[in-house]
Amino acid sequence: MNGGGSSFTALSFLERLRDSADAIGVVSVICNIVDRRQRRYRWAKINAIIEATWHDNFVADTDIAPEVNDQSEVVYDRLEGVSLSEAVSWAGQQSCPVTLYLYDEGKGI
């Protein structure tokens, strides 16, 4: 592995990813996708919810995401009746790293 003595952590990776994204003008990244659909092969019409990924820092056995400033934080947002592709695209265009939650149409909202 790496004998150079550098340490790698998920937090340092996310910070470097955020800095790299800022440098090239990308403002968001989907850090996690939580699929809560019971009908997992449905992709044409689903519901999607996003939250800032650092909200997950309090969940047991989680990777720790850096907090973001109030101006760029996505506290909570949702889309209903969209395709999986639209949900992923929408989540990827947010102003901070997000967790994307997927639900069956009519659920999770």
Image (cartoon, helix red, strand yellow):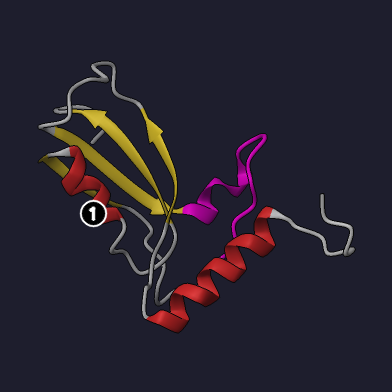
Near-viewer residue (63 or 43): 43
**Residue 49 position in % (x across, y down):** 29, 44
**Residue 50 position in % (x across, y down):** 33, 49
Near-viewer residue (60 or 12): 12
Q: Is residue 1 above or below residue 35?
A: below
Residue 12 falls in image quadrant = bottom right
Q: Is residue 33 above or below residue 18?
A: above
Q: Amino acid at mark 1?
A: Ser
- Residue furthest to the top in view is 38
Q: Residues within 10 Å of mark 1 (few under 14, many from 20)?
A: few
Q: Which residue is mark 1?
A: 89
Going by the image, does 79 lie left or right of 102? left
Going by the image, does 62 lie left or right of 31? right
Q: Is residue 35 visible?
A: yes
Quadrant containing the C terminus in the rendered view:
top left
| Residue in the picture at 41% in, 60% down | 29
Q: Is residue 101 magenta?
A: no
Question: What range is drawn magenta here?
Answer: 53-68
Going by the image, does 74 lie left or right of 6? left
- Main SS, magenta residues: loop
**Residue 43 position in % (x across, y down):** 17, 30
| Residue in the picture at 35% in, 38% down | 101
Q: Is residue 63 magenta?
A: yes
**Residue 89 position in % (x across, y down):** 23, 54
| Residue in the picture at 63% in, 61% down | 13
| Residue in the picture at 75% in, 57% down | 8
Residue 38 falls in image quadrant = top left
Residue 44 falls in image quadrant = top left
Question: Considering the numbered disc 1 on the image, is that residue within a helix, a strand or a loop?
Answer: helix
Q: Is residue 69 visible?
A: no
Number of numbered discs on residues: 1
